[in-house]
Image (cartoon, grey):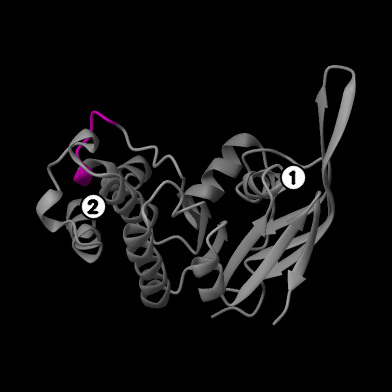
Amino acid sequence: MTTSPIIAVNGLNHRVKLGTTTLSILQGIALEVKHGQSVALLGASGSGKSTLLGLLAGLDIASEGQIRIGGQELSSLDEEQRAALRSKYIGFVFQSFLLLPTLTALENVMLPADLQGRAGNKKRALLLLEQVGLRDRVHHFPTQLSGGEQQRVAIARAFMTEPELLLADEPTGNLDHHTGQQIIELLFRLNREHGTTLLMVTHDEALASRCQRRLLMNAGHLEEQHG
């Protein structure tokens, strides 16, 4: 395993224009995350957590500063190259699941690898669905699945291409406590088995307490929480 960090952020500032007003969303962010770490990102709504996650994913380019993912400097890449980097390194779990309604659970999980033109996708997708406890739901469409089941499909899909980094935005949001606990156990079990780095935006203290590190976003500034 490489000793260089999978995420390296230096001097990150991000501003957005709203009409004639410029809002400073992120200020002076510095962050390093090692391979295989689990990190919780906490903070009030509107503090900049999701903005930071989007920048780390290369979905937007920061106003100033440097972001390296797997050693690649994001600002030096064009949109197509950033998409290729996401495809190679990054998996996503969104609060809204973002499953395609016309695809079955199996087809949704296979999709990222299909887009890469990989072979043997069905076997791997079935194994992942079995790992998340949905082996008997593979041919169900999202509307036929509960919220917890849809979330588990999204997690299986995120691991389909064996990403080195999983970015999750409120992975237990909108779920009841029991289902949320199942998702937490699942994330950390898959983290252990795959060695995937986890960076999760969450308000869930149970989830945050399971992570090796806790980061707090406060009015655009990032600080590490200890103890």
x and y percent of residue 153 in the render?
A: 29, 50
Whether residue 104 appears in magenta in the rendering, the answer is yes
Give, as a three-letter code, the residue at label 2. Answer: Asn
Element under disc 1: helix
Q: Please identify the residue farthest to the top as the structure is shown.
A: 19
Residue 36 visible from this viewpoint? no
Q: Quadrant of residue 15?
A: top right
Kindly identify the residue that appears in the image at 32 percent across and 58 percent down: 179
State the quadrant of the C terminus. bottom right
- Location of mark 2 (residue): 121
Tell which circle, 1 or 2, labels the residue nearer the N-terminal end: 1
Q: Quadrant of residue 28?
A: bottom right
Kindly identify the residue that appears in the image at 66 percent across and 37 percent down: 78
Residue 213 visible from this viewpoint? yes
Kindly identify the residue that appears in the image at 22 percent across and 33 percent down: 143
- Location of mark 1 (residue): 75
Q: Which span is picked out in magenta?
A: 101-106
Please name whichever residue, 163 or 41, is drawn nearer the observer in this view of the structure. Answer: 41
x and y percent of residue 54 in the render?
A: 63, 44
The span from disc 1 to disc 2 (Cα, nearest Å) is 32 Å
Against 160, residue 99 (above or below) is above
Give, as a three-letter code, the residue at label 1. Answer: Ser
Please name whichever residue, 214 or 1, is drawn nearer the observer in this view of the structure. Answer: 214
Element under disc 2: helix
